[in-house]
Image (tube, rainbow, N blue to C red):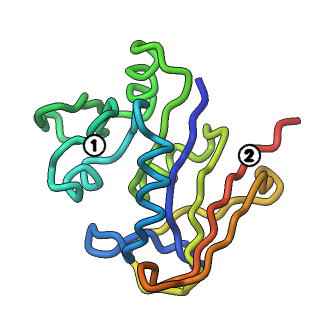
Amino acid sequence: MLISLVVAAAENNAIGKDNRLLWKLPNDMRFFKSTTWAMPVVMGRKTFESLSGKPLQGRLNIVITRQQDFQAEGIVVVHSLEAAISEAEKADYKEVYVIGGGEIYKASLPQADKVYLTKVHTQIDGDTFFPELDPVEWKLASEHRYEADEKHAYAYSFQVWDRIRS
């Protein structure tokens, strides 16, 4: 099964603060929705709670938590990344998308095959960060840059990174 990470990160790799996104980028939201639609998404409990505690429509929502009694309607609750991947495999998906937060990205990056990174071209204060992509392990497969405009306060690039396989 392919493991892909989907993330928007600033130049300093900040992805959030106080369990909230750091920007409003409508094109990034459309990209995220079209990329993950009809596929399994894996997230941590805090990320799920930041979505108003409601599952993302049109996707199998798998939430990883250490809380043994955690439950919410419309999601699959697991207690490890391995269990999350197993749930996606049981449902016969060929790819799973990890969508945050910081600890889940850090845990899943060593197993990941691909990273869909929206690089937000700014330095911004955050308390949650995406791990650095090691250029020995990752290569930039594509990049499309967009300038700031009336709907997007920051310039940004859609990047796809592939793991380098020996």
Residue 61: which quarter of the image?
top left
Q: Name the side, left or right, on which 55 lies relative to 79.
A: left
Q: Secondary structure at mark 2?
A: strand
Q: Where does the C terminus fall, quadrant-wise? A: top right
Q: Position of residue 101 (x, y in %)?
A: 39, 56
- Per the rendering, the mark at residue 56 is 1
**Looking at the image, is mark 1 or mark 2 earlier in the sequence?**
1
Q: Is residue 35 left or right of residue 90?
A: right
Residue at point 25%, 28% (across, down) = 76
Cα distance in 3D space between marks 1 and 2: 26 Å
Horizontal and vertical percent position of residue 87: 38, 21
Question: Which residue is found at the position 52% from the left and 63% from the top?
Answer: 130
- The label on residue 162 is 2
Write the residue at 57% across / 41% down: 4
Q: Which residue does the image show at 29% across and 54% down from the upper left?
A: 47
| Along the line of sight, the residue nearer the viewer: 84 or 99 | 99
